Each structure stands twice: as C-alpha cells, then as structure tokens.
Image (tube, rainbow, N blue to C red):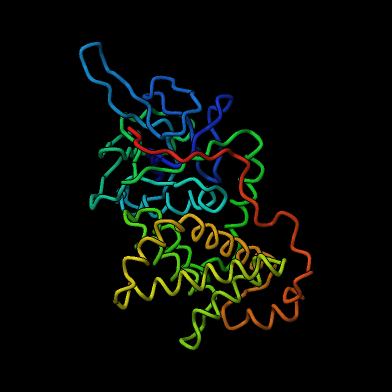
C-alpha cells in the first residue's frame, strides 16, 4: 500500500514567487500552517499566534512530502526517515544549506487507505495523497548553534533535476559510507564531531589502507578537485591539517583544544571539500568510471589531471544558484 509522508524541513527557503519545488519523487512546498508566510527570511520557522491571547509559536515554513510503499499497511518512522534522507541528498550536495529533518522516533504506525496519523512533526496518510498540499502544525528542526539556509528560486530547478538524476546513477552504493558520514555530519551538535565525520568520509573516498593515509587523502583530493597548482597546494594543506587535528582528537594529547578550535573555524570549508569530492566521484561513476581509492592514482596519471594546466570540466562542481544566509538565534 502507498503511504504519503509529510515532514518539516530546515536548511532551504523558497523565493517568494515559488509555492513549491520538485525534488525527484518528492515535493517541497509552503506550509499553510505557517500563516501564508512567503518572506525571504532564511529561518525555517515562521512565528504563528493561534489567537490574540496566545504566545506565538514556531511553525515550519516548508514541508517535504513523499511516498513510501508498505506491503502490510504499516510504516516505521525510522524507515520513513531513511527514505527522506535519500531524497534531500541533492539539496545537501547542491547547496550550502544545513538541511535537517526531524529526528527519527522508534514508533510504527498502522494505516488503511485514507487514514491519517500524526506523530509530532511526522504526518502519515494511507494511500497516494501527493496531490494534496496538507498543512502540518509543527516546527522545523534547529541545530544548537544556528543554521545556514539557502533560498532557491526558479533558476535552480533545472540544476536540482540534474542532481536528482545524477544520484540515480547505477552503483551509487559504492559511496554509501562517505555519503552516510557526510549526511550524518549535519546532525552533529559539536564541530569536532562533525569534522571527524567529514575527515573519515574523505578517508573512505581517497584511502585504501593505513600507509601514509593523511598524505594520500590530501594529495588525491587536491589533484581531482583543483587544476591550478597553487590552489591544489592550498587544498592539500587544509586536508592535511584536518587529518592532523583529527588524530589529536581521537588519540588524545595536549593538542586537543587547538584541534577543537580548528574544526570550529574550518568546518564549513571541510564540508565543502567533502561535498565537492562526492560530486566529482559520483559524476565519474555516471560516466562509467568507478574511482575507488586503489584506482585513483592510475586514473590521475592517465587523465592528465596531474598536469596543473589541465582543464577542469566546465562548472561540474558548482552549487545551486540560490542565495545562502548564515543565521543565528532562530525561533
């Protein structure tokens, strides 16, 4: 049986002229429970007062709606979350927005066609009800320290469709581990935890063994992501430094406070490097080249990308055009 799931979403906004935007098999649309808010404010929540005597409360501006299939008419929230995480991956790979979904709950719901169950911000409806833009009276999730929100407009729809198609490439499970670590890093409340996730994701993409791990990761990532020699060296140093600080955190020692400060200051840059690396490798996979760590060096020499003057693919690592904001103290 089809089950329609609707859930609040953080990390992106829609330009005023857009009521909704397609996301592959899902749709992101404005939440009517937010009081018709169409502002460009980058926060994920509007402030809504139910009546004159009540204090305003946060209500999600945007909702993600999609369907899952259930053979027996029941659905676990954890399974719905897994499906939703896959659907929002194009937003995480295509924008700088800190895309968040509500936490999973260890509950299951039993549905019949036309029935409806709401568990906090999760709304489950039996049957295919994708044509209905139902309202959800719940807040969108917020991280502890603030959020980066990216406002999308009509020019982003084509690029977003391309990213959705790219992530349908056969063999994407080759990068299941780094993709999972990359997505999981968004939910970390401490920069050091997020940073370690991202360093391990780079390791999963660029290292096949224990020998000279830091050097191999930094060298290979720099060579595939940059074609200018000076920019390559800058990127090499950033990744090498990240790995040094990662080791200080994991193995202990007096350098731990310095490492924590480094990840707090450089976390966005490290996430951008991880994002670009994933996009690069997935694009090669789409083109029939599976660049597992043990194959990267041979490909680098054969492709000419070892040459600092080599031409990179035009715009292949660009993000969506939407304007991003750093936002703090959201309600």
Asked if 90 appears above or below 287 in the picture, the reply is above
Give the residue displayed 31% in from the left and 46% down from the top: 144
In the rendered view, tell whether residue 190 sits above or below residue 294.
Answer: above
Which residue: 48% across, 71% down? 241
**Quarter of the C terminus within the rendering:** top left
Figure quadrant of residue 167: bottom right
Left or right of 205? Residue 195 is left
Residue 164, above or below 312: above
Q: Nearer the viewer, residue 276 or 177?
A: 276
Q: Is residue 300 left or right of residue 240?
A: right
In terms of image quadrants, where is residue 110? top left
Q: Residue at x 73, y 81 (%)?
A: 301
Instruction: List x then y, in percent, for residue 15.
Output: 56, 29
Q: Is residue 177 visible?
A: no
* Farthest bottom residue in view: 211
Q: Toward the viewer: 81 or 152?
A: 152
């Amino acid at each position: 049986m089809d089950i329609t799931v609707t859930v609040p979403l953080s990390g992106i906004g829609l330009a005023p002229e857009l009521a909704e935007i397609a996301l592959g098999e899902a749709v992101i649309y404005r939440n009517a429970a937010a009081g018709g808010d169409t502002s460009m404010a980058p926060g994920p929540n509007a402030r809504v007062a139910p009546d004159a005597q009540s204090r305003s409360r946060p209500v999600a501006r945007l909702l993600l709606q999609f369907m899952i299939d259930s053979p027996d008419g029941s659905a676990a929230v954890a399974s719905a979350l897994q499906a939703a995480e896959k659907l929002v991956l194009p937003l995480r790979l295509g924008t700088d927005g800190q895309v968040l979904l509500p936490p999973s709950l260890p509950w299951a719901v039993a549905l019949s066609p036309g029935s409806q169950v709401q568990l906090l911000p999760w709304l489950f409806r039996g049957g295919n009800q994708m044509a209905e833009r139902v309202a959800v009276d719940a807040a969108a999730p917020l991280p502890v320290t603030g959020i980066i929100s990216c406002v999308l407009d009509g020019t982003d729809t084509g690029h977003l469709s391309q990213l959705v198609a790219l992530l349908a490439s056969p063999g994407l499970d080759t990068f299941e581990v780094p993709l999972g670590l990359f997505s999981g890093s968004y939910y970390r409340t401490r920069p050091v935890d997020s940073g370690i996730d991202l360093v391990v994701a780079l390791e999963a993409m660029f290292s096949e063994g224990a020998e000279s791990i830091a050097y191999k990761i930094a060298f290979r990532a720099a060579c595939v992501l940059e074609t200018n020699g000076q920019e390559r060296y800058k990127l090499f140093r950033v990744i090498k430094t990240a790995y040094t600080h990662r080791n200080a955190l994991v193995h202990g020692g007096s350098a731990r406070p310095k490492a924590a400060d480094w990840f707090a200051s450089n976390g966005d840059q490290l996430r951008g490097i991880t994002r670009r690396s994933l996009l690069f490798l997935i694009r090669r996979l789409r083109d029939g080249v599976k660049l597992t760590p043990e194959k990267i060096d041979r490909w680098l020499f054969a492709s000419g990308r070892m040459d600092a003057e080599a031409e990179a693919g035009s715009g292949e690592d660009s993000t969506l055009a939407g304007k991003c904001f750093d936002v703090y103290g959201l309600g």
